[in-house]
């Protein structure tokens, strides 16, 4: 069951990463907090491209490197925590993206991020 869950999460991460690079790039830019682009020498599009590349690498590693699954799971969980402020910023700033066009929808989405953290950790345990 954990192997299936890990592979499913890996496929989801590769898909999400590809969407960052291609068809949902503008949508993801809506989630980049302004404080990030002010603190780093990179614009919102650069953040989206970089995070997409990281998602593809982590997703692929979940499947291709089973001996490192625990370490990769911990890194992925940390990644989910690191991008959570973008979800919060989207809710606070009332940015529409991914069909989240109400405060209720944007806030409800926040509760799914901890589930992703738990999924990453659980599916990569021995």
Image (tube, rainbow, N blue to C red):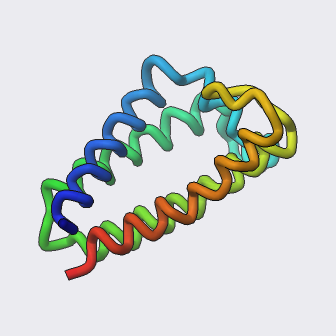
Q: Is residue 41 left or right of residue 60?
A: right
Q: Residue at x 21, y 68 (%)?
A: 2
State the residue in front, 125 or 39.
Answer: 125
Q: Is residue 61 above or below residue 1?
A: above
Q: Residue at x 25, y 59 (%)?
A: 5
Whether residue 38 is visible, yes or no, is: no
Q: Residue at x 64, y 58 (%)?
A: 111
Q: Is residue 63 above or below residue 19?
A: below
Q: Quadrant of residue 42?
A: top right
Whether residue 17 is visible, yes or no, is: yes
Q: Is residue 88 above or below residue 49?
A: below
Q: Point out residue 112 in the picture as x, y percentages from the top left corner.
A: 57, 55
In the image, farthest residue toward the bottom: 126
Q: Is residue 126 above or below residue 22?
A: below
Quadrant including the N terminus: bottom left
In the image, farthest residue toward the right: 93
State the residue in front, 61 or 10.
Answer: 10
Q: Quadrant of residue 75?
A: bottom left
Q: Is residue 48 left or right of residue 100?
A: left
Q: Residue at x 75, y 48 (%)?
A: 107
Q: Point out residue 25 in the picture as x, y percentages from the top left corner.
A: 54, 23
Q: Point out residue 33 in the picture as x, y percentages from the top left corner.
A: 76, 43
State the residue in front, 123 or 50.
Answer: 123
State the residue in front, 74 or 118.
Answer: 118
Quadrant including the C terminus: bottom left
């Amino acid at each position: 069951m954990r192997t299936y869950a890990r592979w499913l999460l890996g496929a989801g991460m590769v898909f999400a990463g590809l969407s960052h690079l291609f068809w949902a790039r503008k949508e993801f830019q809506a989630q980049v907090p302004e404080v990030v682009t002010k603190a780093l020498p990179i614009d919102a599009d650069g953040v989206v491209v970089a995070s997409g590349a990281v998602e593809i690498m982590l997703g692929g590693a979940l499947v291709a490197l089973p001996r490192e699954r625990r370490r990769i799971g911990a890194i992925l969980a940390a990644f989910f925590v690191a991008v959570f402020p973008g979800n919060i910023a989207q809710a606070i700033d009332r940015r529409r993206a991914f069909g989240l066009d109400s405060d209720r929808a944007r806030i409800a989405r926040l509760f799914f991020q901890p589930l992703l953290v738990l999924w990453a950790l659980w599916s990569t345990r021995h």
